[in-house]
Image (tube, rainbow, N blue to C red):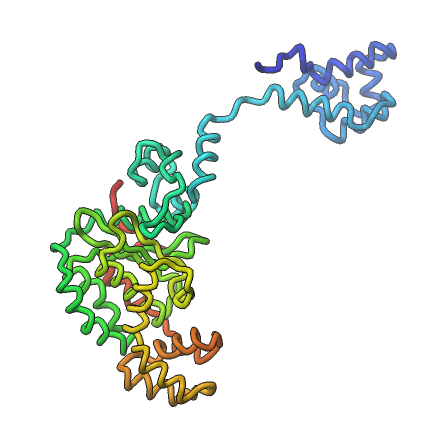
């Protein structure tokens, strides 16, 4: 029930009461306060609020508590404030679940008709309950940030026409993909090669704090690989890509997306799921065959010269950054020859269906 004018009267009524109790006129009080009488009259009639400065002056004039009139004005203003737009509460409820503000900024949804837009984006009738503690195919929890990012990948995948998926073609493409690991510029061929196998390949910049590397999922019999390029460096790109390809080859993700977080960093974690162990093993072997890398480490550790790294990379037919990344992970020396961890995003994006880094993919809800 709204507070009535009677329950919270104008502060000016109390000023008039004090004047009546003392037998003062408004002109007397104006003189005492050092202001013009019309200005005081506006305060008494509620046309002007009681400022903090005026509240202190009135307290001195009437010899009462300094905050008396300030509190009266505050209570009156609050009681007579207009009710907020109902959309404020709804937006707050959605923002508590999803990164709404960043999704609008990225152009994924429009701030107008927000709930309708979000429902279409998430493919649900009720965005307030759509998330509901989702899990991946392997049973891992999906955070709201990851859930939103995943749906952007799916939204973009819907826009792509693809040939039927061929597991045989994808397996046959692996040697050709590995030939691209020598030069960073060759990464531009990856999207086309995957699409020729019936794999929809999407690149979406991650949301702040999401820590997503990639995703593998399926839709209408077609596999979808999404990558965030969270770490723009050659070793991480190839590890994550091969990791996601293995998920596809193993047909992981049919019952829910496989969202990969901190992929390369957790490659040796024994607590991860069996699906992740399989994908990690395939990715590591693809980048640098384990027996060859172990032999190199046994011969050269603990001192790896730049010359040794370049020579081993040439023998393995990969860019030196691949070797450097493996050495860093093995030794935990993250500053080792960092200059070889070259950036690859600039070579990939022109040939990929991508969203982020200042560009918004052209898709429809």
The image shows residue 71 at horizontal and vertical percentages of 73, 25
Examine the image and state in which quarter residue 190 appears.
bottom left
**Which one is nearer the viewer's eye here, 356 or 169?**
169
**Which one is nearer the viewer's eye here, 309 or 14?**
309
Q: Quadrant of the C terminus?
A: top left
The image shows residue 325 at horizontal and vertical percentages of 39, 75
Rendered residue at 36%/46% (across/down): 135
Rendered residue at 26%/82% (across/down): 317
- Considering only vertical position in the picture, is 220 above or below 89? below
The image shows residue 189 at horizontal and vertical percentages of 21, 68
Q: Is residue 263 left or right of residue 34?
A: left
**Which one is nearer the viewer's eye here, 61 or 227?**
227
Is residue 266 at all visible to an observer of this figure?
yes
Rendered residue at 39%/59% (across/down): 272
Q: Is residue 276 left or right of residue 19?
A: left
Q: Quadrant of the N terminus?
A: top right
Q: Is residue 346 left or right of residue 78?
A: left
- Considering only vertical position in the picture, is 241 above or below 212? below
């Amino acid at each position: 029930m709204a507070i009535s004018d009677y329950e919270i009267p104008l502060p000016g009524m109390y000023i008039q009461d004090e004047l009546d109790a003392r037998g003062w006129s408004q002109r007397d009080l104006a003189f005492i306060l050092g202001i013009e009488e019309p200005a005081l009259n506006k305060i008494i009639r509620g046309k002007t609020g009681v400022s903090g400065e005026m509240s202190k002056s009135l307290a001195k004039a009437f010899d009462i508590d300094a905050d008396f009139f300030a509190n009266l004005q505050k209570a009156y203003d609050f009681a007579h404030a207009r009710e907020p737009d109902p959309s404020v509460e709804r937006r707050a409820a959605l923002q508590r679940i999803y990164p709404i503000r960043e999704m609008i900024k990225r152009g994924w949804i429009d701030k107008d008709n927000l709930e309708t837009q979000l429902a279409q984006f998430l493919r649900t009738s009720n965005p307030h309950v759509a998330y509901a503690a989702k899990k991946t195919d392997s049973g891992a929890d999906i955070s709201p940030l990851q859930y939103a990012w995943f749906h952007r990948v799916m939204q973009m995948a819907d826009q792509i026409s693809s040939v039927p998926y061929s597991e045989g073609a994808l397996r046959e493409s692996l040697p050709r993909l590995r030939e691209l690991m020598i030069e960073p510029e060759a990464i531009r061929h990856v999207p086309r090669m995957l699409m020729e196998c019936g794999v929809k390949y999407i690149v979406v910049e991650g949301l702040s704090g999401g820590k997503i590397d990639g995703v593998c999922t399926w839709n209408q019999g077609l596999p979808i690989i999404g990558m965030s390029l969270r770490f723009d460096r050659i070793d991480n790109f190839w590890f994550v890509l091969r990791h996601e390809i293995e998920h596809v080859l193993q047909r992981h993700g049919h019952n829910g997306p496989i969202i990969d977080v901190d992929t390369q960093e957790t490659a040796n974690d024994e607590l991860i799921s069996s699906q992740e162990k399989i994908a990690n093993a395939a990715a590591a072997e693809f980048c640098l065959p384990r027996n060859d890398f172990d032999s190199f480490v046994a011969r050269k550790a603990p001192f790896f010269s730049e010359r040794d790294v370049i020579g081993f990379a040439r023998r393995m037919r990969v860019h030196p950054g691949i070797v450097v990344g493996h050495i860093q992970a093995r030794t935990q020396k993250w500053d080792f020859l960092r200059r070889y961890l070259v950036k690859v995003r600039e070579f990939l994006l022109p040939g990929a269906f991508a969203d982020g880094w200042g560009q918004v993919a052209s898709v429809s809800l």
